[in-house]
Amino acid sequence: MGARRRTLLLGFVVALFLGVAIYFRLWAIDNESFSTDDREVLRKQFERANLEAMDESAEWRMKYDREVEKSRLVQDELLKNEMRGRVQASLAGSCNRMSVPPLSETRKR
């Protein structure tokens, strides 16, 4: 449990560090030393990065949906095969109960 806790704590520290870095980057944009063109370039970079992230997220979601559909189809096929097996076993049991005894048994009587 200790290793998992350390990993989780490290993840939080990394996320905090990245958050602070982004905050300082945005804070620096408001500084007077940045020109309007610099701000526009940075805004476009952030916008492009955001669009790329959304596209990648949508792509992964489509892959996930396809895998879920495949999994559902396989699960349905397994259930059908299982039901067929049960029906066949039931029919075999019924046939065994209702079958005529073998000739060797009828001759003994």
Image (cartoon, rainbow, N blue to C red):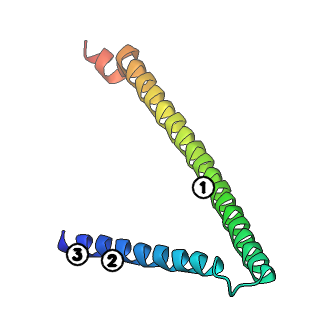
On the rendered image, what quadrant is the N terminus found in? bottom left
Q: Against 36, is 104 above or below?
A: above
> Residue at (42%, 26%) from the top-left corner?
92
Q: Residues within 10 Å of mark 3 (few under 14, many from 20)?
A: few
Residue lying at the far bottom of the rendered structure:
33
Query: Mark 2 touching mark 1, by CB under 8 A?
Result: no
- Residue type pointed to by label 3: Ala
- Residue type pointed to by label 2: Leu
Residue 5 point in image, percent of width and height: 24, 70
SS for dot 1: helix
- What residue did someone put label 3 on? 3
- Residue type pointed to by label 1: Tyr
| Count of numbered tags | 3
107 relative position to 95: left or right: left
* Mark linked to residue 64: 1
> Residue at (47%, 29%) from the top-left corner?
88
Give the mark nearest the N terminus, 2 or 1: 2
